[in-house]
Amino acid sequence: MDYLSDESIVSKWVENPYYQYFSGETHFQWTMPCDPSDLVHFRNRIGSGRQLNQSSHMPNMIIAWQGTS
């Protein structure tokens, strides 16, 4: 697992069409899916026990979470 910063995770989502496809996007997006600071807030909500293997999936989870609120 890569230990990437929140900014790196979000920017990789923008540049990688595979990340976008598997997170449910139907068209390539040129904008960030969320603000990098949202990842911090989301990690705090899910707790420290569950964040071990989820940093690479974080933008997808943020998009899903924002869609339900």
Image: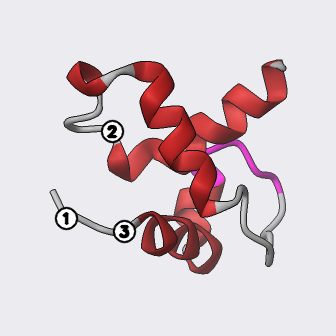
Residue 5 has which mark? 3
For disc 3, the neighbor class at 10 Å (few under 14, some 14 to 19, many from 20) is few
The earlier-in-sequence mark between 2 and 3 is 3
Q: Is residue 68 above or below residue 34?
A: above
- Magenta residues? 21-26
Q: CA distance from mark 2 to mark 1?
A: 11 Å
Q: CA distance from mark 1 to mark 3?
A: 9 Å
Q: Residue at x 69, y 60 (%)?
A: 35
Mark 2 vs mark 3: give the one in front.
3
The location of residue 22, given as percent across then percent down, is 57, 47
Indicate the quadrant containing the C terminus: top left, top right, bottom left or bottom right.
top right
The residue under label 1 is: 2
Q: In the image, is 4 to the left or to the right of 64?
A: left
Residue 55 has which mark? none
What secondary structure is marked by label 1?
Answer: loop
Colour convention of the picture: secondary structure
Indicate the quadrant containing the N terminus: top left, top right, bottom left or bottom right.
bottom left
The location of residue 41, given as percent across then percent down, is 55, 38
Q: Residue at x 77, y 32 (%)?
A: 66
Q: Quadrant of residue 33?
A: bottom right
Name of the residue lying farthest toward the left: 1
For disc 1, the neighbor class at 10 Å (few under 14, some 14 to 19, many from 20) is few
From the viewer's side, name the closer residue of 30 and 45.
45
Q: Is there CB contact under 8 Å for labels 2 and 1?
A: no
What secondary structure is marked by label 3?
Answer: loop
Dot 1 amino acid type? Asp
The earlier-in-sequence mark between 2 and 1 is 1
The residue under label 2 is: 54
Dot 2 amino acid type? Gln
Mark 1 vs mark 3: give the one in front.
3
Dot 3 amino acid type? Ser
